[in-house]
Image (tube, helix red, strand yellow):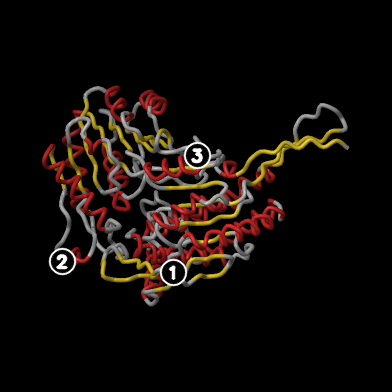
Amino acid sequence: MGFKITYSVLEADMTAVHAAFDDALAQARGQLGAEAPSWIGGKPVRTGRLIESHNPSRTKEVLARAHAVDASVLDEAVANARRAQREWAAMGWQARVAGVRRVAELISERRMLFAAIMSMEVGKNRLESLGDGEEAADLLRYYAGIVEANEGFIKPMTRLSPNEDVRSVLRPYGVFAVIAPFNFPAALPCGMTGGALLGGNAVLLKPSEETPWCTEMLAGCFADAGLPAGLFQVLQGTGETIGAALIAHPGIDGCAFTGSSAVGHHIFRSMTAERIKPVLLEMGGKNPAIIADDADLDRAVEGCYRSVFGLSGQKCSALSRIYVHDSLADEFTRRLAERAAAMRIGDPTDRDVYMGPVINAESVARYEKASAAARADGTVHFGGERLREGAFAEGHFVAPTIVTVPRDHWLEKTELFLPFVTVSPFSDLNDALARANAVEYGLTAGFYSRDPARVAWFLDGIEAGVTYTNRAAGATTGAWPGVQPFCGWKRSGSTGKGGCGPYYVTQFMREQSRTQVG
């Protein structure tokens, strides 16, 4: 490919990309029903209960069978991790950087097959799936570059006497649990794992039970990179079994988690009840965009469309609340509905499809509940129905949905993780900002205005860690490693420092002051 596929690609010549994807898709379809073992001590483990991964576009189609493990394997896995971590830490930061970069290269080499599998297993369209793999590799490279630029975070300090050598050294904690969701099965586990490994730690990954095939692809890249056996281990299974046991194990020194706010807060309380441990949480969002009366409406419609409906709204950064000035509200809503009506929905492996299915039956039920509430209490401008006819009958397909509900309605407060947005007119910009901030989350936010003073006002007033203004590529979505740090405020995050940014890796290390008198 002659350019990088990111989440902000708007237009380019995709002929060669689609041809390569078609070849990879044929290869992936030849592997349906693939085994997805757990990985413990550098070896695949093919015991335990089988969990099937189904195609959300055709729910009767089995994609992979995961070998789920339970708490009985944890003592062995943690002991393996502890041995490998000591070996890894002793190698020095240069060797760790080189090892992580090898993983990144393998992901890049295999990105087409990875994307084809991801499109089937997650329901992402082609470009979103390719972007996920590209981001995974870029996260590893970016974090490796941060460690290299800081020379392993070994800093000479001021001396109080000439015969002293004083240094600040960042050291690993030991063994990290990494718990990842379904929606970015390459980028999210890689980002968290990369930060932990570059900090000198070992990792026990608990992936989503929805994406075992993607996880097996990722495990293969780590296995083939020549890292110490047991440094990166994969525990396939459910959150209720292996996930709960993992965070409760006394040999786990820290945790990095991406997922819902409720689960994240449970993990934090559980892991810090007896002693303080590093718990890095990237959680949900109820992300707003404000469209002022002087906005470029073309940009606003395009940016909101992409951020509401990309990946069927199943992103923590997805746009779910739009506040638009009274003078533009009717035209904006009409144009957004027209864009939704023209959207191609279907099997996301098809070249021209923009929006695929939601991930599972629970998501469909949540969609139907939200749609019923909007019909009962407000106005449905577009959508609000499950798609059941023709090719949609076999999958978890729902219509892109645009609604207006009364102020402070629960649909304006609750994260849905669906292609579902509320549109609310406003007359006073200060009131719009107050409404944008009146939720427990603070992840991403967008703003549209031609006035630089208003833009500055928004950036200073919005309670969100990731902000965008006047962006057609996405009102609230599209962060990229080394470009937009991704930090959740309020109930969207735990540390005040985000992934994709320059301070992320240091959170996996602790400081040691070394004073040596010679």
Q: Mark 1 Cα within 10 Å, few/some/many (few <14, many 20+)?
A: some
Which residue: 44% across, 43% down? 282
Callout 1, which amino acid?
A: Gly
Q: Name the residue under label 3.
A: 273
Relative image position of residue 72 (x, y in whole percent): 50, 62
Q: Is residue 467 visible to the viewer in this orientation of the structure?
A: yes
- What kind of residue is marked 3? Ala
Which tag, 3 or 2, sits closer to the chain's start? 3
Percent coordinates x, y for residue 273 in the rendering: 50, 39
Mark 3: give few (<14), some (14-19) or many (20+) Cα within 10 Å: few
Instruction: State the residue position of label 2.
Output: 390
Cα separation between marks 1 and 3 = 31 Å
Does residue 517 sit above or below 254 in this rendering?
Answer: above
Where disc 1 sits, the SS reads loop
Q: Label 2 amino acid?
A: Gly
| Residue occupying the point 68% across, 55% down | 86
For label 3, the SS is: loop
The answer to whether marks 3 and 2 mark residues whose Cβ atoms lie closer than 8 Å is no
* Mark linked to residue 48: 1
Q: What element carries label 2?
A: helix
